[in-house]
Image: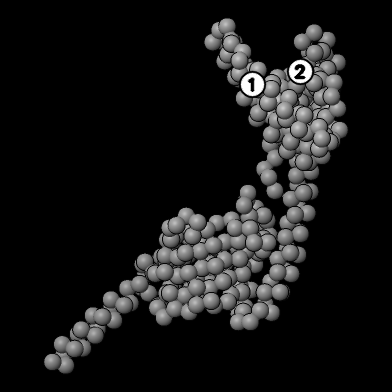
Amino acid sequence: MKPILKMSVLAATIFLVVGCQDDNKADTNKPVEPAKVEQTTASAAVATTDAAKVEFKTEDQKAAYAIGASLAQYLSANLDQQKELGLNLNRQDVLAGVEDVFAGKSRMTQEQTQQALQSLDQRVAKIVEQKAKAEAEKNIKVGDEYRAKFAKEAGVITTKSGLMYKIEKEGTGAKPAATDTVEVQYKGMLTDGTVFDSSYQRNQPATFPLNQVIPGWTEGVQLMPVGSKFEFVIPPQLAYGAQANPSIPANSTLVFQVELLSIKGGKQAQQPAVDAVKAATTATKAQ
């Protein structure tokens, strides 16, 4: 879900006054027909060209206009986000409030204004909470269905914790311990195939301590000999659970393709050197 930025009616009026003075009688709730989109775009292009030709008389005038234009761009994006929540601010009511205050005849007291804005904040918070809850519940169902289908594929193994994996290539090197630092190439995806992270795209392997990642990674990578490539399907409880971020929704089942390139530190990484020393010592004694 996109992060929702709330704003007051007064903030919305700044955008409307700056960007829409010539259109203050339009009905913003009325959908734009496809044929009219081209006309609107063309008109906007002409307006932009004409605006570029305007010469400001003073630096203060130019700065003031730039502030208004910047606010308009920012607030326009936020108005669109509010519309996604089903909250539509009527342009005529907004402009009426501005004009009344400028004329010194506001129809609301300061206390009434604050109460109205607080009510708006509460409605936004409630809608956001409801949408987040609905999406989290949907993601649980989607993940359950994906894992059930994946479990039926040939070669899939499910551990006691619920971690699922399939060996695409099995290496012959050592297996890391949870305390080791490993070097990997990986691609992380949602169940719909959306890639949210990839070392391949960065053209650079990732290196990290194995006990400082999500539980599904800590458990899964320990199963891999160096040189292996596994596909992991990680349930929410072994990933980020109910915690959401911009790229990974709450309660998401995650899919990872992982190649273990090397073990950088810890006992497993030191073992080959220890073995070499033992072999050299044995050879010396034999002589």
Mark whose residue sits in front, 2 or 1: 1
Residue 281 at x, y percent in the picture:
19, 85
- The Cα atoms of the two marked residues, 2 and 1, are separated by 18 Å
Amino acid on which the number 1 mark rests in the picture: Thr
Work out whether mark 2 precedes mark 1 in sequence or the reverse, and give the earlier one.
Answer: 2
Mark 1 secondary-structure assignment: helix
113 w.r.t. 266: above or below: above
Observer-nearest of 5 and 166? 166
Observer-nearest of 204 and 138? 204
Displayed quadrant of residue 203: bottom left
- List the residue tagged with mark 1: 49
Observer-nearest of 129 and 166? 166
Residue 62 at x, y percent in the picture:
58, 13
For image coordinates 67% across by 54% down, the residue present is: 249
Residue 157 at x, y percent in the picture:
60, 80
Left or right: 173, with 46 as reference point:
left
Amino acid on which the number 2 mark rests in the picture: Gln
Displayed quadrant of residue 18: top right
Residue 184 at x, y percent in the picture:
45, 65
**Which residue appears farthest toward the left when viewing the image?**
287
Mark 2 secondary-structure assignment: helix
For image coordinates 81% across by 20% down, the residue present is: 24
216 w.r.t. 40: above or below: below
For image coordinates 68% across by 56% down, the residue present is: 250
Image quadrant holding the C terminus, namely: bottom left
Q: Which label number is shown at residue 21?
A: 2
255 w.r.t. 61: above or below: below
Q: Which label number is shown at residue 150?
A: none
Can residue 48 be spotted in the picture? yes
